[in-house]
């Protein structure tokens, strides 16, 4: 199992529109081969950033091959949709985690 984590900081004045878009985006991701689950978290900042909302999405994938396929075949298109809609009103960072077996 691979965990693909995407953290976004969204301008608060577009947060409702972004959340609505994100719900559909997560559905599109889960329709891809190898994606098995997703969960969206609100990041609790200390201290909170009054101007931005932070969300973190954890996508669970079957294996590294499924992630590699997503990155090669789908990532550019799916990421571009968010940029086209929201421009520079959000920032995203991504990381990949694997079980340490502990």
Image (cartoon, helix red, strand yellow):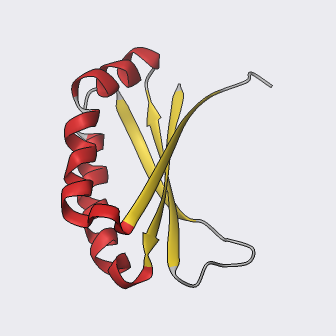
* Coordinates of residue 98 in the picture (x, y in percent): 62, 26
* Coordinates of residue 11 in the picture (x, y in percent): 42, 75
**With respect to residue 25, does 37 lie above or below?**
above
Residue at the image position 28 percent from the left and 21 percent from the top: 72
- Name the side, left or right, on which 57 lies relative to 65: right
Residue at the image position 31 percent from the left and 27 percent from the top: 70
- Furthest-top residue in this view: 65
**With respect to residue 73, does 19 lie above or below?**
below
Residue at the image position 20 percent from the left and 52 percent from the top: 81
Q: Quadrant of residue 83?
A: bottom left
* Coordinates of residue 24 in the picture (x, y in percent): 23, 58
- Furthest-front residue in this view: 88
Residue at the image position 44 percent from the left and 58 percent from the top: 91
Asked whether 23 or 81 is in front, the reply is: 81
Tell me the quarter of the image containing the C terminus.
top right
* Coordinates of residue 95 in the picture (x, y in percent): 55, 37
| Count of number-bearing discs | 0
Q: Quadrant of residue 62?
A: top left
**With respect to residue 56, does 94 lie above or below?**
above
**With respect to residue 26, does 64 lie above or below?**
above
Asked whether 8 or 36 is in front, the reply is: 8
């Amino acid at each position: 199992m691979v965990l693909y984590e995407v953290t976004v900081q969204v301008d608060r004045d577009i947060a409702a529109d972004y959340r609505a878009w994100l719900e559909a985006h997560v559905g599109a991701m889960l329709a891809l081969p190898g994606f098995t689950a997703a969960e969206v978290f609100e990041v609790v900042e200390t201290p909170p950033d009054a101007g931005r909302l932070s969300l973190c999405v954890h996508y669970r994938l079957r294996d590294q091959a499924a992630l590699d396929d997503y990155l090669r075949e789908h990532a550019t298109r799916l990421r571009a949709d968010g940029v086209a809609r929201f421009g520079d009103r959000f920032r995203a960072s991504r990381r990949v985690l694997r079980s340490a077996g502990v």
